[in-house]
């Protein structure tokens, strides 16, 4: 079989005539056109490659750690919102930003943060989070430069802090992993957007700017504000439940648009302060427990609760946010509004021409004695937040009452969250 098949094939090959090609040359213009086309494609390809590899920057995220040596160990370092944690984190963050800003990659540096302090044999391990921009081709180079800058920084000991350069670890992490780290922490924003704090006066908020802000809806309609303090709990004002306390009548949504509701959640339980009485302003605070956990995202995550001892000094800047009325008995916005305010000392707020003694120690006044910028109807229960020196946001107040909105000598009055810190802990374990 095999031999006969070979014979047949040989016959076919023998019968095949040689093929002759006619050598007609192409016209000159066509050759020129082809050369031009090839060169153009080559040029574009090289251009694009250079653009993506060398010119266009990508954002890279890193997480790492190092050891701080001469710290007398204190359990409070582990607590995210403790003064000890904030104090040490601020020192380390300043050291890092100074080092990067003075380096030859200062143009690539975007942000660096201490995300956690963990005790280890009487020392503290600082976990860090970094954000840089660099062209693709420089990726490896950038990482080794960052490592080098951090190593040199850790070698230099300042008056208060001794750090161990040999303990340094650093690895690149994905954008998703980097954002997840920030979104599980309280009071931080995943994006370091320059547009966030630019506008003064009441204005529309950017997406992800106030991720703890919730809309409390009664029968599907916005009724009050609320602040997310954990995956399951929010704080709001007690007077929001004047009409009904039935959890089935309420829903909670997030984001910047009040409708349609974004990330709709149902209410399992409403916990109103035991010593709140309708018609009175005292103890105007309540807790909302959701039926299901909120999954944290860039634009939905929790605010920090201050410690009971934290002080919010008069004159400090705070921000109130909400979907409340734009003027007393006026229109309601669709987009979340923000208004920068100043904390007003209680004795000034209690002056005769102001609230004449109605403001108690468990309340906090914020706004302007000349009026105009203020919270209003529908903002009740919402957050009044204060940024600390690391730009981490704390819930200082809960929108509660005031005489109309934006009137001279009648600033907004808020429940002072520090006064209710242990009450919140007793109801939520937070
Ligand atoms: C309200 O009726 C209300 N200007 C909330 C805040 C303020 C006034 C009224 C403060 O819900």
Image (spheres, helix red, strand yellow):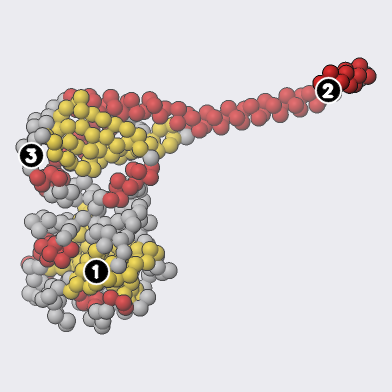
Separation of disc 2 and disc 1 at Cα? Answer: 88 Å
Quarter of the image where one finds residue 118:
top left
Q: Residue at x 24, y 53 (%)?
A: 186
**Can you tell which mark lies on residue 73?**
3
Separation of disc 3 and disc 2 at Cα? Answer: 90 Å
Residue bearing the label numbered 2: 1
Label 3 packing within 10 angstroms: few (<14), some (14-19), many (20+): some
x, y percent for residue 340: 26, 60
- Relative horizontal placement of residue 362, taking residue 398 as reference (left or right): left
Identify the mark nearer the N-term, 2 or 1. Answer: 2
Q: Is residue 120 above or below residue 331?
A: above
Q: Residue at x 13, y 36 (%)?
A: 120
The answer to whether marks 2 and 1 mark residues whose Cβ atoms lie closer than 8 Å is: no
Quadrant location, the C terminus: bottom left
Quadrant location, the N terminus: top right
Identify the mark nearer the N-term, 3 or 1. Answer: 3
Say which of marks 3 and 2 sits in front. 2
Q: Is residue 191 above or below residue 152?
A: below
Label 2 packing within 10 angstroms: few (<14), some (14-19), many (20+): few
Q: Residue at x 22, y 40 (%)?
A: 114
Q: Is mark 3 within 8 Å of ligand 1?
A: no
Q: Secondary structure at mark 2?
A: loop
Q: Secondary structure at mark 1?
A: strand
**Can you tell which mark lies on residue 288?**
1
Q: Is residue 103 above or below residue 313?
A: above
Is residue 130 visible in the rendered image? The answer is yes
Say which of marks 2 and 1 sits in front. 2
Quarter of the image where one finds residue 368:
bottom left
x, y percent for residue 181: 30, 46
């Amino acid at each position: 079989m095999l031999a006969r098949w070979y014979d047949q094939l040989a016959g076919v090959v023998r019968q095949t005539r040689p093929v002759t090609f006619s050598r007609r040359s192409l016209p000159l213009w066509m050759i020129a056109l082809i050369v031009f086309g090839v060169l153009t494609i080559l040029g574009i390809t090289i251009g694009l490659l250079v653009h993506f590899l060398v010119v266009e920057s990508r954002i890279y995220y890193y997480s790492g750690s190092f050891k701080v040596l001469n710290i007398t160990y204190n359990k409070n370092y582990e607590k995210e919102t403790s003064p000890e944690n904030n104090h040490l984190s601020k020192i380390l963050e300043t050291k890092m930003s100074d080092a990067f800003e003075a380096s030859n990659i200062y143009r690539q540096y975007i942000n660096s943060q201490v995300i956690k302090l963990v005790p280890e044999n009487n020392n503290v391990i600082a976990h860090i989070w970094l954000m840089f921009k660099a062209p693709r081709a420089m990726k490896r180079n950038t990482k080794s430069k960052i490592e080098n800058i951090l190593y040199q920084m850790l070698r230099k000991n300042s008056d208060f802090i001794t750090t161990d350069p040999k303990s340094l670890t650093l690895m690149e992490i994905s954008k998703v992993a980097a954002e997840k780290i920030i979104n599980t922490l309280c009071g931080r924003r995943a994006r370091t957007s320059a547009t966030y704090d630019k506008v003064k006066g009441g204005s529309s908020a950017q997406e992800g700017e106030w991720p703890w802000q919730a809309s409390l809806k009664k029968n599907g309609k916005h009724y009050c504000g609320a602040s997310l303090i954990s995956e399951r709990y929010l704080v709001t004002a007690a007077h929001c439940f004047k009409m009904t306390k039935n959890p089935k009548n309420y829903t909670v949504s997030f984001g910047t648009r009040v409708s349609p509701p974004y990330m709709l959640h149902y209410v399992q339980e409403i916990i109103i302060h035991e010593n709140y009485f309708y018609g009175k302003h005292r103890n105007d605070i309540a807790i909302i427990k959701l039926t299901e956990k909120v999954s944290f995202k860039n634009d939905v995550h929790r605010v920090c609760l201050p410690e009971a001892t934290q002080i919010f000094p008069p004159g400090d800047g705070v921000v109130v946010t909400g979907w409340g009325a734009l003027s007393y008995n006026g229109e309601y916005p669709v987009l979340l509004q923000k208004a920068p305010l100043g904390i007003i000392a209680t004795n000034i707020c209690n002056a005769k021409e102001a609230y004449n003694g109605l403001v108690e120690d468990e309340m906090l006044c914020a706004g302007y004695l000349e009026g105009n910028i203020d919270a209003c109807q529908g903002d009740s229960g919402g957050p009044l937040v204060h940024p600390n020196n690391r730009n981490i946001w704390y819930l200082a107040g809960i929108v509660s009452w005031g005489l109309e909105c934006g009137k001279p000598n009648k600033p907004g009055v808020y429940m002072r969250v520090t006064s209710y810190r242990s009450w919140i802990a007793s109801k939520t374990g937070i």
